[in-house]
Amino acid sequence: MKILIAYDGSECANTALEDLKRAGLPNEVEALVMSTADVFLPPPDTEGETTAPVYVPDAVKRARELAQGQLDEADAQAKQASEEVRTMFPSWHVRYEALADSPAWALIRTADEWKPDLIVMGARGHSVFGGRLILGSISQRVLYEAKCSVRIARASQKNADDPVRILIGVDHSSDSTAAVDAVCSRNWPKGSEAGVLAVVDTVMAIDSAKWIEVDDEKKWDKVREIFEPTAEKLRRAGLHTEVLVRRGTPADEMLDEANTWGAECIFVGAKGARGIERLLLGSVSSAISARAHCSVEVVRR
C-alpha cells in the first residue's frame, strides 16, 4: 500500500499522524511524508562563459533567501514527521519531501505522479505566513481533485489497541462497495465494530432495473436484508457488524448516526447512486468530511 501523508506542523497535522494508529493500516506500506512552503522559489542565477556578471537587486536576493528559508523549514518538518511515522510503524518504508508550491496543488500533482492508494491529511492546517488558518480549503480541494482515496483525520481519545467503531455509508454504488472493501482489507483491533448505514427516501434501488418501496419503517426489514451480505462480508473480516437504516438527507443522517453511535471513522464512497449515479463531492462526501467530529475516509477505487 502507498500512502501520501500531508504535514505542515499544525496541531491537525499532528493529529493526522496519531490517527494512522487507528486506521487499520497494513504492515507493508510505502509512505511519503510531504510538506510544502507556499512560496515561489526563483531559479538560481546563472552566468554564461562570455557574459557579464548578472546583477541581482538586493530585494530579489532577500526574497529568495526568505523563500529558501521557508522551504528549509518545510523540509525539517517533513523530516521530523517521517521519523515519527517510522517510529510508529517500524516495518514501513518511509521517506519525506518538501516542495515550494501551493499546498493543495502540490499534493494533487504528487499524487498524480506517484499514484498512492490513500492521501492522509488533517482537517485544517496553517500556511507558513503567520500561522493563518486555511479552514479546510486545502483538504476540500484535495478531496475534489485527487484520483485516489482521501482520509481526513481527527483526534481520538482512545488508545491505538482499543476497538474501533466504523460507520460505512452504503447505497449499492460501486464506490460504496469500494468503501466496504477498504474496511475489510484493514487490520482492526479485536472487538472492533462496523455499522452499515443505508439512508432511505421513499424508494430504493436493488439494482439498475429493480426498485422497492421503503416509505415507512415497516418495510425497512427488506432494506436490512439487501445489505445483510455486505454486513456478513465485514463479519468475515473480523468486525462485529449491524445494518442500520435511517430516513432523510444522507449527509445529515450519517453525521447524526456517527455522533449517536460513537463512530471514530466514517467510510463513504466518492460517488453514490440515488436513481442515477451522481458525484457526491460537494454534497454528501464533502459535507461529511467538513462537518464530522471523527475521521472521514472518502474512498475511490
Image (cartoon, rainbow, N blue to C red):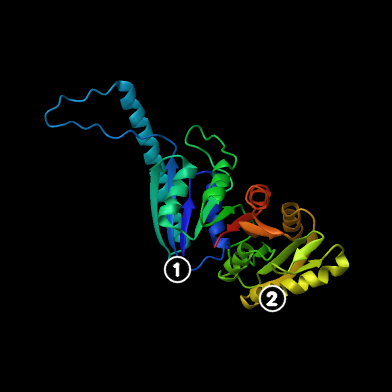
The reply to whether callout 1 and callout 2 are in contact (CB within 8 Å) is no
Amino acid type of disc 1?
A: Glu
Q: Quadrant of the C terminus?
A: bottom right
The percent coordinates of residue 210 (x first, y second) are 74, 69
Q: CA distance from mark 1 to mark 2?
A: 29 Å
The percent coordinates of residue 275 (x first, y second) are 72, 59
Q: Residue at x 79, y 55 (%)?
A: 248
Which structural element holds mark 2?
Answer: helix
The image's mark for residue 107 is: none
The residue identified by callout 1 is 28
Q: Residue at x 51, y 52 (%)?
A: 146
The percent coordinates of residue 199 (x first, y second) are 76, 60
The percent coordinates of residue 90 (x first, y second) are 43, 65
Q: Dot 2: within a 10 Å radius of its alpha carbon, few (fewer than 14), some, or many (20 or more) residues?
A: few
The image's mark for residue 229 is: 2
- In the shown orientation, is residue 291 left or right of residue 126? right
Do we see residue 264 in this rendering?
A: no
Which structural element holds mark 1?
Answer: loop
Amino acid type of disc 2?
A: Pro
How many discs appear? 2
- In the shown orientation, is residue 238 left or right of residue 9? right
Look at the picture and state if 249 lies above or below 210. above
Q: Residue at x 44, y 48 (%)?
A: 109
**Which quadrant of the structure image shows residue 271?**
bottom right
Do we see residue 180 in this rendering?
A: yes
- Closer to the camera in the image, 214 or 66: 214
**Which quadrant of the structure image shows residue 221?**
bottom right
